[in-house]
Image (cartoon, helix red, strand yellow):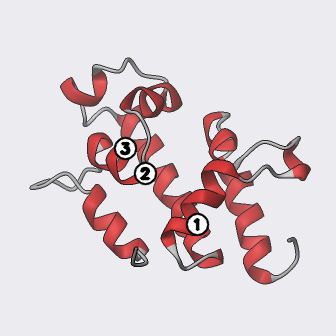
Amino acid sequence: MSAIAFADVLESAREAGTSRLSAANLANVLGLQQQDLATMAGVHRNTLRTHPESPKLQSTLRDLMRVLSAAAAVQPDFERALFLVKNQPIPAFRHKTILQLLQDGRTEDAIDYLESISAGFVG
């Protein structure tokens, strides 16, 4: 399987004809259930379909893309970066994954952690 570039993921996450991110497209690319994205955003699952412009939903999707961008800086192979985000427990955060940090509203902590790895300070 060929490596996927972050720029391709970002473009595929865009809702056609708009400047919004598409929860359905992003869930598909990331291999997540739409219900998981709705839970992460704190919205009802139908919001993804009926109100994709919801500020709360769009903010969560943007945070997810920010974390994925930071992960891609650490691991340029997007599939490996995604694996890291979804599955690698981080001892400094009570063995939570980066995705779990996002679900807890700790986007900045997740990005700081990834940037520290990228800079060579943590590993």
Amino acid under disc 2: Leu
The Cα atoms of the two marked residues, 3 and 1, are separated by: 16 Å
Which callout, 1 or 2, points at the residue further toward the start of the chain?
2
Q: Nearer the viewer, residue 68 or 43?
A: 68
Can you identify the residue that label 1 sits on? 81
- Residue 5 is drawn in which quadrant? bottom left
Amino acid under disc 1: Ala
Mark 1 surroundings within 10 Å by alpha-carbon count, few (fewer than 14), some (14 through 19), many (20 or more): many
Residue 112 in the image, given as x and y percentages of width and height: 74, 63
Give the mark count. Answer: 3
Q: What residue lies at 78% left-to-right and 82% top-to-bottom?
A: 119
Mark 3 surroundings within 10 Å by alpha-carbon count, few (fewer than 14), some (14 through 19), many (20 or more): some
Residue 49 in the image, given as x and y percentages of width and height: 21, 28
The Cα atoms of the two marked residues, 1 and 2, are separated by: 11 Å
Which callout, 3 or 1, points at the residue further toward the start of the chain?
3
* Tag 3–tag 1 contact (CB < 8 Å): no
Quarter of the picture containing the C terminus is bottom right
On residue 27, the disc is 3
Secondary structure of residue under mark 1:
helix
Q: Is residue 34 left or right of residue 102?
A: left
- Residue 57 is drawn in which quadrant? top left
Secondary structure of residue under mark 2:
helix
* Tag 3–tag 2 contact (CB < 8 Å): yes
Mark 2 surroundings within 10 Å by alpha-carbon count, few (fewer than 14), some (14 through 19), many (20 or more): some
Residue 72 in the image, given as x and y percentages of width and height: 55, 73
Quarter of the picture containing the N terminus is bottom left
Secondary structure of residue under mark 3:
helix
Q: Nearer the viewer, residue 84 or 68?
A: 84
- Residue 94 is drawn in which quadrant? top right
